[in-house]
Amino acid sequence: MRDKVVLITGGAGGLGLAFVERFRQAGARVYCVDLPRDGIDESPDFIGCDVTQVEDLQRAVQRIVTQSGRLDICIANAGWVPPWRSTSELQIDEWERAQAINVRGVAFTLSASAAALKASQGVALVMSSVNGRFAHGQQMAYSASKHAVLGIMRAAARDLGPHGVRVNAIAPGPVATSALRARVSARSGYSAEAEENALQSMAEGNALRRLVKVEEVADAAFFLCSSASSGITGTVLPVDAGIECI
């Protein structure tokens, strides 16, 4: 990965930040693309960007190519998890936001990066979810968006493959991030005991009887973007501690 140039959307926190750190450890030049925020806007490797705005994405890619001369890897990681709601309680604003960030944001991240990736015969990776392979109740908006991501990935793999560009997806299961804990805490009425019980219940649904670690998802992303996976494209890699084995 030394001397590779990497774009990671949603790279300022959560899984995105873990990806940034993993690729930087390997010697890559990594650009963190995320919503503008105080404290990191001044970094030369941070680009303020709203992935729902096509022009923002185009400017971000242009800046990377201008500064570094190339783009080798694009990871469309930015996403949003709406509140859990039953089918009868769907909210139009939450639905639209989920599709704007999780679907349009991914599609147009790939679109904006396509020419640069063709030039470098690079790699693209998109973030789906186990909810893109099956669905949990009360997560229709999220599940719909993550199913769509897999269609985007497969179409892009067909389009870009003849140019030497690989496109794959990762489908994480529940990952022990602060964001997951915050959602579970809210759902549990901010009871520490109820939160731990809910997390344990999630873990018991997996073959490994635990949640996935952030580092494990980052390692999977690194593999799919490395030469070790040079013959793999158009596929989705579950990183879910065996949730589909149960």
Image (spheres, grey):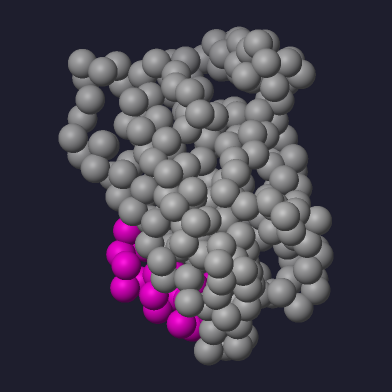
Q: Which of 4 and 84 is in front in this view?
A: 4
Q: Can residue 139 be seen in this view?
A: yes
Residue 49 image offset from top left, x and y in percent:
41, 67
Residue 22 image-quadrant placement: bottom right
Residue 50 image-quadrant placement: bottom left
Name the quarter where the N terminus is drawn. bottom right
* 49 horizontally vs 76: left or right: left
Residue 39 image offset from top left, x and y in percent:
53, 67
- State yes or no: residue 27 in magenta: no
Q: Give the range drawn in magenta.
A: 43-64
- State yes or no: residue 61 in magenta: yes
Q: Nearer the viewer, residue 160 or 50?
A: 160
Q: Which of 185 and 144 is in front in this view?
A: 144
Identify which residue is drawn at 66% across, 55% down.
19
Identify which residue is drawn at 36% across, 19% down.
138
* 208 horizontally vs 19: left or right: right
Residue 169 image offset from top left, x and y in percent:
57, 46
Name the quarter where the C terminus is drawn. top right
Say if 54 sits above or below 119 in the image.
above
In the rendered image, the residue lying farthest to the front is 162
* 89 horizontally vs 123: left or right: left
Identify which residue is drawn at 64% across, 39% down.
237
Q: Nearer the viewer, residue 66 or 15?
A: 66
Residue 69 image-quadrant placement: bottom right
Residue 212 image offset from top left, x and y in percent:
69, 30
Identify which residue is drawn at 41% across, 66% down.
111
Say if 100 sits above or below 84 in the image.
below
